[in-house]
Image: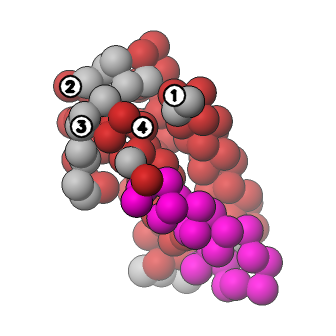
Amino acid sequence: MAVHRKRYEAFRADAYRTENSPEIRVEAWFLAAFHHIDACAARHNRHIGKHQNVRKELEANERIFGPHTQELWQAFQELETRIRPKFVYGSAWTSKDLALAQRLFEAIEARCREALP
């Protein structure tokens, strides 16, 4: 759990550095969100391992986020599959997309903070 928390904190810091490019910031929010979710899972002796497994692991282990499970994995999935590719692989993103990436990350972060002591 400590390793994931440390990675979450490092990526989070990178995401909020405005001198970083928007592309790097979105990637850092994505990575921070993944490691924060994985830290929550590790608290319950579950290990997600890779970002493609977030939904499967959370649905199989709803005790991690309780009634917020679907909300959390959906926010992560939107960040992963709709927003992140615009920045990492494309060039058709806007400032609204950047703001949405931040909001999605912050929603995930809030739920993770509730789940961790």
- The residue carrying pointer 1 sits among few (fewer than 14), some (14 to 19) or many (20 or more) residues within 10 Å by Cα, namely some
Q: Which mark is residue 40?
A: 4
Residue picked out by circle 1 = 115
Looking at the picture, which amino acid does disc 4 mark?
A: Cys
Alpha carbon of mark 2 to alpha carbon of mark 3: how far?
A: 10 Å
Q: Is residue 99 magenta?
A: no
Looking at the picture, which amino acid does disc 1 mark?
A: Ala
Looking at the picture, which amino acid does disc 3 mark?
A: Arg
Q: Are marks 4 and 1 in contact (CB under 8 Å)?
A: yes
Nearer the N terminus, badge 2 or badge 3? Answer: 3
Q: Is residue 23 magenta?
A: yes
Alpha carbon of mark 4 to alpha carbon of mark 1: how far?
A: 6 Å
- From this view, report whether residue 78 is shown above or below residue 13: above
Residue in view at x 52 percent, y 32 percent:
116
Foreground label between 1 and 2: 1
Q: Are marks 2 and 4 in contact (CB under 8 Å)?
A: no
